[in-house]
Every structure is written in structure tokens, then in C-alpha cells.
Image (tube, rainbow, N blue to C red):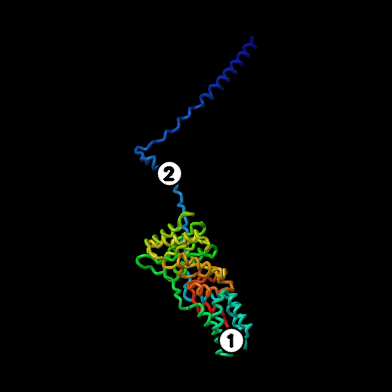
Amino acid sequence: MVEYVVAAVILLVVLVVGAVGLVVPRMRRKELPPPPVPQVPAVQEELPPLIDRVEAPVEPEPVVVEEEPQQVLEKPEPTAGRLVRLRARLARSQSALGRGLLSVLSRDHLEDDDWEEIEDSLITADVGVEATQVIVERLKERVRILGTRTVAEVREQLAEELVAALEPDLDRSLRTTPHDGRPAVLMVVGVNGAGKTTTCGKIGRVLIADGRSVLFGAADTFRAAAAEQLATWGERVGAETVRGPEGGDPASVAFDAVKRGIDTGVDTVVVDTAGRLQNKVGLMDELGKVKRVVEKHGAVDETLLVLDATTGQNGLEQARVFTEVVDVTGVVLTKLDGTAKGGIVIAVQRKLGIPVKLVGLGEGPDDLAPFEPVAFVEALLGETA
């Protein structure tokens, strides 16, 4: 019995201890206080409008566009004395018209064979048979009268005869001054391949170098590159170019160019025409039409025929036919550089009575020079030894 009491006491003690263990932790737990509520100030500062609070977009940096540099207009060389400056271009011609003749004429006694050699030299240089005969006869007379001569004396005599053959009294001025309230009109004609469009550009530079204002008329409508080429020449010196559609009526373009020249008040209108063969009647008639249409504004002041110096005597036939169609007033002789045929200047003038007014002595833009007979002969003869 005692054993049962002890067991019951022990069980009671265990139950009491367990109950105390469960109650005490609960008594220790305390509820956490609620989180503090933020105190709102009595007067709250007014917030800016939402649109102001949104961050402004970042302005992109301005794009700097570099302006293209303005084209600097070229200033053509002055024409005064230009032929003298270009005399070296005639170096190859000296062997035909210069040194060869001087070497023969300086001999102590001139026999028939010597005179034949002189004639051959002049004819080879494209002076022409008739002009050669005149020059040789005059030289013979001088030799007979003067007798023995020094090289310097012979050179002087030869120079005088060549200058005389070039007819220095011919009027070689270009009529490029405006008159009657309109510009002077200068029309350029020639066969295919003579360098006509390039020569037009160079003529424009000659006029600008002499103080004229210029407008180009691209009346060569059969060759698309011709109008573009002429416009490029004009842009270099600040000259306007009037052009028409490819294959259009060249007379219409020429007419419009002169009208534009009148409206803008330029000094000179340079009209480029299509190259044509002198034996093609239809093409030559069309050239006559161009001139007639232009003359509705007034007379054409200059009609310049471009001849290639290397064509020799064949160039004379070209000049003759063009003269009949458009009344050529002057000749521009191109490609005299690198040729021994400078005598074509004499032949053209003697045969046609048309003065050579300009000569081309190279590929440079300012290698076109006003023709001066004395300077030309001096360049051909070169320096005496």
C-alpha cells in the first residue's frame, strides 16, 4: 500500500513540474508593441505639380553640319603679252620655219639648190605654194642687193618677210563690247574634233581676263558631254551657261542664250555650235539657221572658225565652206604646240583674207593667246646662235 502512495506522489510531482514548465514560458512572452506610426507634421509642404517633378528630357547635342567651302573662282592670266610667255610651245616649229631657214640663208653663196631647199622648208611648214613663192622671191631680191650678210642680218630679213606675209595690218581685235542695249554675240563654229567646245571655254577666259563678263550658250545639243563640258568651264570663272535638252533645237538654245544675256546685262555671249563636216549640206544649212535665229536679237558680232593646225592645207577647204555659210570674221588656230606646221597661219590669211585672231599653244586653260604677228615670228625663229 505504501508503495502505491509513493508512486502516486511521484506522479503528482511530475505533473506539477510539467504544468509549471508550460505556464512559465507563456508568462514570459509579452506582445510586441505595434510599430510606431510616423508623425505627420501639422503643415505639410506643398508638393510641386507632377509634370514639374518629372525629370526633363535630355536635349540632344545639336548636329553641326559643315558647310561646303565656296568654290573659289579662277582668275585667268592677263592676255597682254601671253603669246610671248608661251613662245617655248613653238620650239618644235623652229626647225621648219626658223633654224632650218637661217642655216641655209647664212651660206656665203646661195645656189638654185639652196633656194629649192628654202622653198621645201616653207611648203613643208604649210605656208602654201603661192605664199612661199612670194616670200622666196623677196628674199632673193634682198640677197642680190645686200650681198654678204651676217646671221643676225639674215634673221632680221627673214623675220621681216614672214611678218609681212602674215599681213600685220589686218584687224585682229575681237568685237566683244556690248552695244545698243544688248551684249556682243560671238558665235564659234568648226568641224568635228577641232577642239571647239574647249576653245569656247578658253575664249571665255580670254574675255574675262580682259575685263568682260561672259555668258555661254551650249547650242551643241547633239553631244550631251558638250553642254556639261562648257558648263564646267563657266563654273570655274563664274560665267553662266544656258543649255537645252539633249537633241533639242540648237537655234532655240542660241536664241535663249542671247535673250538671257540681254536680261542679265552681260558684256558678251559666246555661243558654241555643234561640230559639222564641211561637205554635209544639211548640217551646214542648220548652222546658217542658228545664225539667222540669233540675229532676231541683232547682228552676230563675231563668227570665229576653229581650225586644227595639224590638218594643214585641208583646213583651208574647211575654212572656205564655213565662210560661205556664216561669214566667218576670224580664225582660231588650235594645236600649234608640238607641230612644225606653223605656216598654216600665213596660208589661211592669204587664201581667205580672214585674220587669225587667236592661237592655241597648249592644253592649259590659259594657253589661248591673241595672235600677234611680230611675237609669233620671233617665237618661230628663236634666238640666233
Q: Which residue is mark 1?
A: 151
Between the residue at mark 1 and the residue at mark 2, the CA separation in whole angstroms equals 98 Å
Residues at circles 1 and 2 in contact by the CB criterion of under 8 Å: no
Q: How many marks?
A: 2
Say which amino acid is labelled 1.
Answer: Val
Circle 1 Cα neighbour tier, 10 Å, few/some/many (<14 / 14–19 / ≥20): some
Q: Position of residue 5 (x, y in %)?
A: 62, 12
Label 1 secondary element: helix
Say which amino acid is labelled 2.
Answer: Glu
Q: Is residue 168 above or below residue 257?
A: below
Q: Which mark is residue 241?
A: none
72 and 30: which one is in front? 72
Q: Which residue is mark 2?
A: 55
Q: Position of residue 223 (x, y in %)?
A: 51, 57
**Placement of the N terminus among the 4 image quadrants:** top right
Q: Is residue 380 above or below residue 280?
A: below
Q: Is residue 64 visible?
A: no
74 and 375: which one is in front? 375
Q: Position of residue 220 (x, y in %)?
A: 48, 59
Q: Is residue 131 visible?
A: yes
From the viewer's perspective, is the residue at label 1 or at label 2 nearer? 1
Circle 2 Cα neighbour tier, 10 Å, few/some/many (<14 / 14–19 / ≥20): few
